Amino acid sequence: MIPFAVVGSDHEYQVNGKRILGRKTKWGTIEVENTMHCEFAYLRDLLIRTHMQNIKDITSSIHFEAYRVKRLNEGHSAIANGVEEKEPEAQEM
């Protein structure tokens, strides 16, 4: 087990003319993406690298299947993918 020093934030600040995600403290601003301040970038990369196949599988098997079932249960509506479908009209000869 590797310990990580992680700081999270959803606030943007201007530091040296650059917009960064960070957290203000009485000592200054902690930059979330700066590896000298926080190991969030390392932790994010580790989790994505080690769990990417699991993320793909869950997205496919759970989220997409739930969406597919919901759409199939809606029945034969006149609107598909946000576009109204019109029945083809019979042409006289």
Image: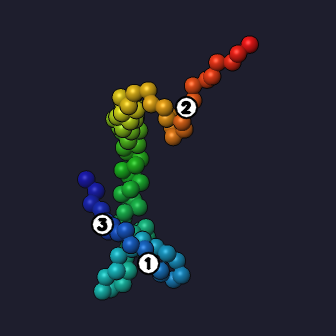
Label 1: few (<14), some or many (≥20) within 10 Å? some
Q: At x 32% / y 86%, what residue is drawn?
A: 27
Residue behind mark 2 = 85
Give the number of the disc on residue 25. Answer: none
> x%, y% of residue 5?
30, 66
Dot 3 lies on which element? loop
Dot 2 lies on which element? loop
Q: At x 51% / y 40%, what residue is drawn?
A: 82
What's the CA distance linking mark 2 and mark 3? 54 Å
Residue behind mark 1 = 13
Nearer mark to the viewer, of 3 and 1? 1
Q: Quadrant of residue 31?
A: bottom left
Can I make out residue 6 in this image? yes
Q: Which colour scheme is used?
A: rainbow
Residue at the extreme top: 93
> x%, y% of residue 53?
40, 38
Q: Are marks 2 and 3 in contact (CB under 8 Å)?
A: no
Indicate the amino acid at tag 2: Glu
> x%, y% of residue 35?
42, 68
> x%, y% of residue 92?
70, 16
Can I make out residue 57 in this image? no
Name the residue nearer the viewer: 37 or 25: 25
Residue behind mark 3 = 5
Nearer mark to the viewer, of 2 and 1? 2
Q: In the rendered view, would you say 41 is above or below 80?
A: below
Name the residue nearer the viewer: 31 or 91: 91
